[in-house]
Image (cartoon, helix red, strand yellow):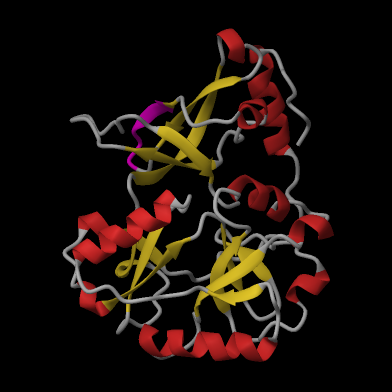
Amino acid sequence: MASLNNPRPATYCILLSAALLAPLPATYAAPPPLALANDYEDVDVDLALYWVSEKYDGVRAYWDGTRLLTRAGNVIHAPVWFTAGWPVTPLDGELWAGRGRFEAVTATVRDFEPNDEAWQNIRFMVFDLPRHPGPFDVRLAEIEPLLTRAKIDWLKAAPHARVTDAAQLDARLQAVTSAGGEGLMLHRGDSLYRAERSDDLLKFKPYQDAEARVVALLPGKGKYTGMMGALLVQDANGTQFRVGTGFTDEVRRHPPPLGSWVTYSYRSVTARGIPRFASFLRRRDR
């Protein structure tokens, strides 16, 4: 996509429409069968049944035994050395470079010509074995020895632990977020891997988040003149609203293209279903 360095507001739609009409690279596969999470606050949970891990602020990825794929099914162009020697067993995990480095990870993952130096900062944090027929308790026990046999420093098992009650879970969330982490994941130990959204997998954050599709780029004013000022987005229910905060200057100069999906945080919703205090978090995995 052409650079959008300080374009005049009227040029946004023209430039982005041209980019969207450009042919896609031949690196698209079917979306991988991934388990998706519900919100912890929305369900009645017996914590004794769940394992808890950190929710990594990176890019969800699926190793199918030969290729790394994004959640949408795009092939990730990692260097050959990065995946050399990986197990042929499918792996579900997160490409991660540490807390607070989401933008660095996405910039690296989206490159079609892999940058060796950038990839040296990334680890693949494995948290499940999608094709394993057993419950998560068994799958979790097999991840560590599987990766230990591979002897690859950047292929890591995501640490999991148990909590006994809500107070312990809250304390764990506070510890992770105070250190710059995003939140927690809860995985039901007796559950089979299901490629759908369910209560077997839960996310727990200090805020709520959701996804919406970009339908317009609204021009900035004042110090943001010549850049994107806000996004007009539409959620899965067809509700349109503005997301006007949470952007870095880099994102304002190179905004998410029309038709792409973004993740935003919010506190609550109005009677009309409009998110309150919607703030941009990131562009969704391609």
Report whether 218 appears left or right of 12: left
145, above or below 22, in the image? below
Asked if 192 appears above or below 58 in the picture, the reply is below
The residue positioned 76% from the left and 62% from the top of the image is: 120
Residue 175 painted magenta? no
- The answer to whether 251 appears left or right of 76 in the picture is left
View extreme (top): residue: 222
Q: Which residues are magenta?
A: 237-242
The residue lying at 57 percent from left, 52 percent from top is 285
Residue 249 pos. (x, y %): 62, 26
Instruction: Locate residue 61, reporting x and y percent.
Output: 58, 65
73 over 188 or under it: above or below: above
Q: Position of residue 63 (x, y in %)?
A: 62, 74
Q: Residue at x 38, y 61 (%)?
A: 184
Tell me what residue is drawn at x 83 percent, y 55 percent: 113
Residue 147 appears in the picture as rendered: yes
Query: Of residues 240 and 167, which is closer to you in this image?
Result: 167
Q: In front: 240, or 267?
A: 267
Q: Quadrant of the N terminus?
A: top right
- Residue 173's x, y, as percent? 34, 57
**Is 194 displayed left or right of 272 in the figure?**
right
Q: Is residue 204 visible?
A: no
